[in-house]
Structure formats: C-alpha cells, structure tokens
Amino acid sequence: MGGSKGSGAKGKPGEQPAENPKGKGKLSGDQSAKKTKGKDNDQPADEKRPRLFDNWTGKTPVTLLNEHAQKSGWHRPDYNIQGRDTFRCTVRLSKHDIKTGTQTLHFTPTATTSTPETHTSAAIARHFAATYTLHRLLSTQKQMHLMLPPAHRTYWKELPHTNNTGDPFMAKLSHERSVQVRAAEREKRQRAIEEGREEDLLRPHERRRWEAMAEVTVSEANRQMAEEVVRTYAEWCGAGTVSNKELVQMGFNGAHVAEALEHTGSQGQALDWLLVHVPEGDLPSRLARQNVPAFVAHSPLKQQAVRRLAQMGFPTGLCAQMLEEATKQREEDSAEPLAAYLLWARLCGHPVPVFDGSAEQTVGEEVTVLEAIYMDERKVTHAGSRVVVELPTCCLEFWFPAGLRYPEDRPAVTVSGALPSYHKLNIAKMLYQTVQPTGFPIIFDTVSVACEMVPTWTAHPPRLAELMVSLIPKADKVPIDIMKRTAPKKRSKHRQETDIGELCEQFARLQANLRYQEMQRQRAQLPIWKHAQEIVGLVETAPVVVIAGATGCGKTTQVPQFLLDHSLKEGRDVRIVCTQPRRVSAISVARRVALEHSSTMVGYAVRGESQQTSDTRLLFCTTGVLLQMLADLDATHVVLDEVHERSVDSDLLLALLKPRIKSGLKVVLMSATMSDKFARYFGGAPIVKVPGRTFPVAEVFFEDFVRTVGADSVFGAGAANRALARLNSNEEWAGRTKRLIEVGLGERDAASVVQWEDQFAQPSNAYSIDYPMVKAIVEHIDQTAPKSESILIFMPGMAEILETTQILGATGVSVLPLHSMLSPQDQQLVFQPTKNSNRRKVIVATNIAETSITINDIGFVVDTGRVREIEHTNGVAQMVTRWCSRAAIVQRRGRAGRTKPGTCYHVYPKRLFAKAREFAVPEIQQTPLEQVCLRVRWLNSTQVLQTMLDPPPTEHVKKAEQLLVDIGACEKEELTAMGRLMAQIPADLRLAKMLILGALFGALEPTLKLVALMSLDRPLSPQSTGKDADALSDWLADLHLFNEYLGGNRGNGVSPVAAQEASRAIKHLRTSVERIGLGESQPRDVNELVLRALVFAGLSLNVARVTMPRHKYQAISGTVEVENEVPVFHTAGNNRVFIHPRSALFKVTKYPVPFVTFLAQHRGHNSDKVFLRDATVPGLLAVLMFGPPLSVDHKNKTVAAGKVAAVRAWPRVAVLVNQLRRLLDELLRRKLDDPANISIDGHPIVNAVLQLIQTDGR
C-alpha cells in the first residue's frame, strides 16, 4: 500500500514478510515470512516485495492478535486467505473448554472509507483482518489503536464501536442459548395459538400467570347432568337480535348461529347456547376441550363400545347411559347393538319392541342379495348384529339386536363417517321419517333414499333444538322471558277494616265514659294540649308540619291522638302511621296511647310482632317496618318521631314520602332537638314549637363526683398517692390538674381525675369503660337516695350491659337489662315496679331508652357517654363504639326529669362534653349505600337518593350500585330474584344472600348459625382455643365450637355472652326466612364444601389470591426441590396481605384452591402489615357459581369472577355454570311470583347446583 511504513515480522527494520504467491491456503502467524528466508538473500528487500509498513518499528497487528490469544488461553489464530489478483482474509479463533468442548469464532473484515474489502497482497489482507479482529475484541480499550501502524489506526477509528468487553466465546454461547429459548417460545406460542389462546396471554408474564391458574375440572357424569338440566330449562332464556358475523368467524355453522340468536338476547348468550347445544365433536377447534379424557368404565370393552356409539353423533354421556341399560339385559359383549337401538329409538321417538324373535337368517339372505346388486359399486359388510353400507360421504349402519323380529320390526339405522355429528343424527332421523315400514326388508330402500337425499339434507343443517329435543327430558313449556321481567304479583296486605261509621259511633260513646274522661283530664295537663287546635289546623291546610317539642311536652303520645280524634269527630276515615326509631318505644308508646284512648283503634307493628285489628286506625311501628310497608301504604297521615337521629331509614323515609304529599298524604315531623333544616326540606313547612314539662335535672360530671366523695373513696389511697406523685414528672398533667383545682377540686382529687381521664376518657378511646366506677356511683346513689327512685344506666351495647349486670348483681339492687334483642315481654319489665320494695331498680340500657319512652320512677341517670354505631370501613357492617353527640347526651339527661326532679351522673369529664359533636353525623353520609340502593330499587324509586335531606356522594352511590351487580342482586339496572329476596330480609345483604342459598339447598340450620356468628360484634371464642384448621375456614371452626357448646360442652372456650347473642339472632333470622317463603326445603346432610361455598357466597367480594413463592432447591447428592412453606396472599389491586395469627388458617401451607374469602382486613398494631381475619377457602366451582358476574374468555379458555379470582376452564364448563346461575335466579323469581304453586324443594336446578358444589365438579 502506498504510504505504508514499518517492518513486517521480527527482524531487521524494513524487512518485509513474504506472501503466498498463489494467494491460497492458511498461514499461521508469520510462517510465510519464515518460509522465504534463505531464498534470494542477496537481493535487496525493497526489490523483492512492496513494503507493508514504512518506518514502523512496533508490533504488527498479527503479532498483537497472537499475543492476545495466547494471553487469553485460546488457540493460535487461523487466517483464511482467498483471492488471486486481490485478496481478502478471515480470522478463526478457537478455544477448548472441558464443559462445552471446542468453540470457534469467525471474523470477516468490513470495508470503510479508507480501507477496501480486498487488498493487493495476502499479507496486507492478513494484517487488516487481524486489526479488524482486535477491534471486535478490544475496541473499548482507549489506547489500543495507538499500538497499531498509522494506516491501521485510521481503519480502527472508522470501524463501528462495539460493546464486547467480556469473553467472546461466552457471549456467543449465551447468544446461542437465547436464540434457542426464543425459538422454543415461538414454538410454544404457535402451539398455544393452535389450542385457542390469544396473543395477549402469551407474553412472558401473562403466559406464566395463565399456566399458574387453577383449572376447573368437571367429571363427565357431572357435566352430562348439568347439560341435561340446562337443556331441559332452555326456554327460560330470553330472546334478542344481534350480529352473527363473529360467531360464524369463530367456526360455528351460520344456520346454528341464527338459531342461537333466536333463543338468546346477546352475542355472549348465543355463544353460551351454542356451546351447550352443539355436539362436542362439532365445536370449533379452539373452543373444543383438549385432551378429553376417555369415558371411565369398568372394562376396556365398554370404553370401546361407548367410543364407537359416540362416533355416530350421540352424546358420550347418553351413550354410556344406554350401554349400562343394555348391559342389564344382555351380556357385556352383546350389549352394544341393543344400546345402539335404544339410542336410535330415543332419537326418532320409536317405541322399543319386544325382543323375542330372530333376524339372523333374514338379514343374511338380504345381505347376499345386496352384494349381488351393488357388486363393486359400494361395499356391504355384515358383522354379527350389524350391517354397514358405505355411501360416498358416510356409512349407514343397520343394527339388529338379538331377538329383533325383522322385518316385522324395523332395525335401527345410524350414520357414521366424517360428517358433523348433527348431520349424522339428522340423516338418521330423516331416514326414519322417510322410509316407511312395509313388513318386508328395508335395507335396499333405505340405502336408495339415502343416496338420493343425503346431499340435500347435508346442504341444509338441521335446527339443533328440534334435533336434540328427543335426546333430553321434556322441558317445562311455560314461556318465560327473563330479560323482560313482568312486575311481580303483589300479595294483598290489606285486612278487612271496620266501617268508619261504626268507629265514629264508638268514639262518640267514649265521651261519656268515666275512665276516658279521667284520661282526658290527665292529657290536658301536658304542655302540648294547648297546641292541639293549632296542630290540627295546620295539618288540615299544610301537607307537612314540623313540631319542635321539648322533652316531656307529650308530643309522642298526643299528636297522633289529636289527628285521630279530629277525623273521628268529622266522620272522616283515617289511617295514621306513627314511626318510632326503636321497637321498645313503638310498643310502649302504642300501649300508652291505647290506654289513654280507651279504644281498640290503636295498634303496633314491629319486627316479629304485630298487634292490630280491623278497628285499628292508629298504628305505631318502627321506621324499618314502615319502609317495608311503603310499597302498599294506604295511610292518610304519617307521623315521624325523633327525626333528629338522622338514621338511614329515617332520612330515606323523608325522601320517599316527599313526592307522595302531592297525592294528599299528610306528614308530621317531630323531635325535641329539631332544626329548621327539616322545614326547609319540605319547602318552608310550618313549625310548631312546644315547651316541655320536664323537672329540673342536676348534672354531676365525673370531676364533680370525685370532689363529692373524695379520691381515696373512689380510687383508693394507693392510686391517689401515685397520681399525686406523678405531677412533678409531667408538665401536661400538672397543667390539667391546675385547671381542675381552679374549679374547686383539691390537688389530690384533681391529680386522680387527670390520671383516670387518661385511661377512660380520651376522645380517641371510647371502648374503655370503667365498670368499677359505674358500680361506685350506683352504690353512692343507693346509700344516699330513697329506694323508690330507680337508676337508668346507658351503655353502648349488649356486651357492656351483661358486664354491668354481673358487676351490680352483688350490690343488693335489682338489675334489669333493656336492649333490642330482648323479647317485647322482657322489655316491658322495666316499666313495672320491683317485687321487693327494699331493692332499688337499676335499668341498664342501650340508647333505645334515650327517646320516646318514659319510665315513671327514674330518678337518676348514669351516662357513660358511649353509643354503638354501624361502621362499614371493612366492607361488611360491623358495630363500633363511639362517643355520642351533645344532642344525645341532652336526651339521656332528660330521662331523669320526666315525672319529678332528677340527677344525671356523667361518667366522663365536662371538657369531653364540650368537645362532643352537636348532632350525630347523618348515617347516610358515612355508611356504604348498597343496602339503601337495594331498598330503593325494591320500591322502584331509584332517583330518590339525590333528593334526600343530605344526598350521599355520587361516587358512593355508583360504588354501591356496582356492588349490587357484583353480589348478584341487580342486573341491567333491575333487581334479580335474589335481590328482591335480599331486600326483604332485615340483615346485611351479604348475610341475606347466605340465608337464601342456605334455605334453597336444605342447609338452613347450619347457615342460620353461620350468619348469626358472623353478625356478632365480638369473637365467639376470645382465646381461639380448639379451632379446627382442617375445616379450612374460621367460620366453620367457630361453627364446630358453637355446636359443641350447644351440645353441653362448656369448656371449649366459647364466650357465653356471644353464644347467647348468636342464639337470639338465629331465632330472629329464621322468622325472616320463613316470612319470605323459603323455609320449605327439607334438611339435607350437606358436606363442608357446601358450607364453605355458602360462606363464599356472602363474602364473595372479599377475595385474596393465594400464590406460592418460586421453587427453591437444595443440594443433597443432587438437586432436590424444597417444599414451600409460606404462601403469599394478594387482594384486588395486588395488595399483599397476611393471615392473622389467630386464624385457623395461619399454619396452613397447602391450599387446595388458590383463593380465600374473608370478612375483614385489619392493620396490625405497631406494624404496616394488613391481616385477614375470619378466612375461608372455597371450592373452585363455588367461586364460579356464587362469585361476581363471570367474564368468560372462550378463546383463551379462562373465566374471571371479579378482580381477583381467575381460573382456567373449558368453555363448555364455564357456560354451564353461567347458565345454571341464570336458571337458579329464574327459579327464585318464579317462587316469588307464585309461591303457592312453585316448589324449590328437590328441584332439578337446585339439585344440579348442589351436586356440582358438594363434589367441586369431580
């Protein structure tokens, strides 16, 4: 090359290496230079060959490459030179490795701007090839190019940069492996596509997830049973019109798609219909089940027979059934012809003859004649009881079971071959209808008709419903359109009423009654009596009237009587409904009013109890009962008492009644703490303010009580000393103590009060109640006041009531509980005096005693300041304890001054009262709305929520509506039958769903117990002793403990208080179920899979996915997989959670199903971990049957129930489950609309669902 400088191989400066004169062969290193030494030495070097490197004294590229190879432990580089006039060279590097063997790398130089691909000599080509190889290996070394000759430096800089910094042989090996992996992935992807999965599930992450999904399997027997039920009740599906293009593209016959669309209402439903009705062998390949297991029989002979019969187009399950039937009459090796005859007879509707003749000789003669007629035209085969005649497109098989009187009785004619199953069945059926028996052999006639008509019959596919109708039981022919539901038949709830004229005469006679006159004089003493005419006049002229009556004014008992008396005097018919917030107040007020009115026109209706006659014109009830009555309400007046409590039912009633005032309904709102907001809600309704007739009530806050009796008496000297000593170490304590001293407490008393407040009276701690302090107050009253003055103690809930009654039991007082779980008879005991006049009556009550009831002998109120309210932050309604509002405190205080002066002891400091919220937060603003949305849909008033006094947030409403859809209560903005039933059960809708399904499946008793346990606000067993981990459910473990307790085992850790609450709830819930007509099913002996399925049905929206960590291995004379011990749980949104240590599932490491359902989530103390409490492992079929609406991906063969539970399933199985879900709801709808004539006990649909659930499909 021109301008090249430097030397060649080692030697004198300027000496050039020799070249291969032929330009061929391989030269290793500088071997060619050595070969030329000694030849023509006397000639000057520059005259022998052109110079390679002018004035270059450094190492040549070939030398540098040799050294790098030697240093790296590789073989000496090999150079392959090609060309004659111009030359090119490639380099081969090689390396031997013990594990991988000999590896080679090939490098072929590329041209650049200054360097061509070929060169004028082999030596030049060899050096440039060495430079190129060095660049490929060492381009990241910044100074490497400076070791090259100048021309090669230029070539080096012009070559593209590479990132090879490691061992090139290892890089090549890694590349080859990645190529192999990608090729395997492509092959696997292609195979998966052929199996029907789509590309979106074939990406690495999604594919792994698909393969890790649990697979739902259903046995052949269970599948056939379910398909039979679905086909039997196929007419219970609606109709519609949609496009069939996509279904045809999927591989279905166009005529069958059109038929499916006639029977269904959407493309998805049409696909479901096709998957159920199209024979298995005719399904498109990507929707067909892969690796279908063979029919499981007792012998290979039966398996082969079933397979041959199924090849004629008959369902596999039916073939097995007919073969079993034939085996009962024939030997196993001769049962197949009879089974074929039975199948054909069922298909064509042909009566099965008596097999007492013989056809062997006649058939043999006929076959001989046929062979002579057809000769080589078509093949005729006679094998035992079967004759096969081949046609161009199929084969006709004539069956002559032993004993058939042929030709008097016709043989069975079936079709085999490559035709679709529906064509085979249709040809057989059409031949039966076309070829009429004549008493002569008919094989020839049948073959002749088939040859002529089969092309026509196969050109027009049969209608599947008509073709398959004879292969399944007759369907119920009552036409039902579940997509266009008619309004349910409403049961008449109106009783026969007494004529208003008779009641007016009765009322007129009352005016002369001395007892009535005495009652009138007592009524006249009440403050509200003076406002009677004003109230009546306003009600006459205004649709809505607001009465703000102070406590004790008499509004609750008198206003309804004012309206009743006025109507009776005017001779007008009237029906007044007056609501109370609680059952006990409704009953007690009704009895008081009935006594005052001295007539039979006053009654009451509460949950589980009603007292009314044909004379009743004034009905007292709870707000919940009025909501249930609202659909058929025919009242003239509605009086809502205590509306200030702002319960969901109360606010909802206001919104539902508002549009009814236009039709003449009169509404009266009453409360002691009324705000103008209610009047404005009804367009400026008139307000009547009535002063109260209460007596003065002295208030004693906690610090006042301590000041009165002394800290040593209240806390003990030791505790008071410790409190006093702490003052010097805590500045905050010292400041609070100083403020108490300023209001009259001694330092010792003040320090003790501050110490007590920290434990029992913090705004954030409403759960801690000082029961000994309550006892001390009661004992102080008992020692200082007359025994005739009773004490009313307010506690937040029933558990606190029981605790208090036990503590006070030893103090010599007569303790009576008062709460909503008591029977009306037990509740009325609080109004009666004690039998022993020397024992003081002490009533321990919840806030049901806060309003509307008057206990005449109450002289003292002990208020703990707590209230139990519903909280829904965990997804299921639970009761929590909170500090009550000032309005509630005022109401409680007023209970002590109803009939005489009284005293109210507040078991909390005055500062806490000052910080309390003024009114209770409207329940509608802080509770999930699914229960409310269910109720308004039941009443067909879906828009009412936005017209409420305080409308709930729109996003809360949308969330609630979606939840109703997910839980199966609503579909397409209409209530399902399940939703209609749930709306009539006074329980959390999740628990209501459990009760409905439990009653449906004959498992009502265990379900009642489960629901009662789930509704408790405390654990059944606080110590969690004896929990059965094998039950795979905390609730079933609790059920076992509860059953043991009921059986007499009192030492298993069950809380007696919780057991009593559960027993009361069971009685309550049973009445509700019987009232809606679902108590008829006979009890069944269900297994734990069914009970776990029922738990899942209620909690199906709370699901966590269970996954196991990646496999770990340990080396023990090889690679051994280590068992995974810690499963991982994730909820919706892929949030990780943990099983609570107190759960029965805490130590479970192997889950048969990768899902758990749970009641609630709790954040651990001093931890960011979120724990699942009360978990249950459902069966896979339960997840699909009772979970959220299914999303079936027929192409990918996956089914999703909600956001967490996704499984693999053959599309036919997924469709069957979906169809059974619809049929189950339709059955419930029929039961609702016609309860007298529809029975659910033992219904085939119920049996099918129960069979799948209790076997989990196996």
Image (spheres, rainbow, N blue to C red):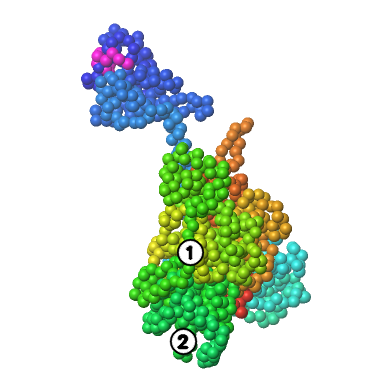
Q: Which residue is found at the position 46% from the left and 32% from the top?
A: 173
Question: Where's residue 969, x and y in %?
Answer: 50, 67
Quadrant position of the N terminus in the picture: top left
Q: Amino acid at mark 2?
A: Ser
Disc 1 marks a residue whose amino acid type is: Val
- Whichever of labels 1 and 2 marks the residue nearer the N terminus, that label is 2
Q: Is residue 1164 above or below residue 694?
A: above
Which SS type dominates the magenta stretch?
A: loop
**Which residue is most to the left?**
3
**Label 1 crowding class (10 Å Cα cut-off): few <14, some 14-19, many 20+?**
many
Res. 477 image quadrant: bottom right
Instruction: Report which residue position mark 2 lands on.
Output: 567
Q: Quadrant of the C terminus?
A: bottom right
The residue labelled by disc 1 is 697
Expressed as whole percent of the image width and height from the top left, the position of residue 216 reads 57, 56
Residue at the (66%, 80%) spot, across then down: 437
Q: Dot 2, how many residues are within 10 Å of its Cα: few (below 14), some (14-19), or many (20+)?
A: some
Name the residue located 50 percent from the left edge and 79 percent from the top edge: 523
Judging depth in this view, the residue of 544 and 1110 nearest the camera is 544
Judge left or right: residue 82 versus residue 362.
Answer: left
Q: Is residue 1055 left or right of residue 985?
A: right
Q: Position of residue 1210 (x, y in %)?
A: 55, 58
483 and 615: which one is in front?
615
- Check if residue 957 falls in the magenta segment: no
Q: In the figure, is residue 970 to the left or right of 955?
A: right
Question: Dots 1 and 2: beta carbons under 8 Å?
Answer: no
State the extent of the magenta-drawn residues as a range. Answer: 46-59
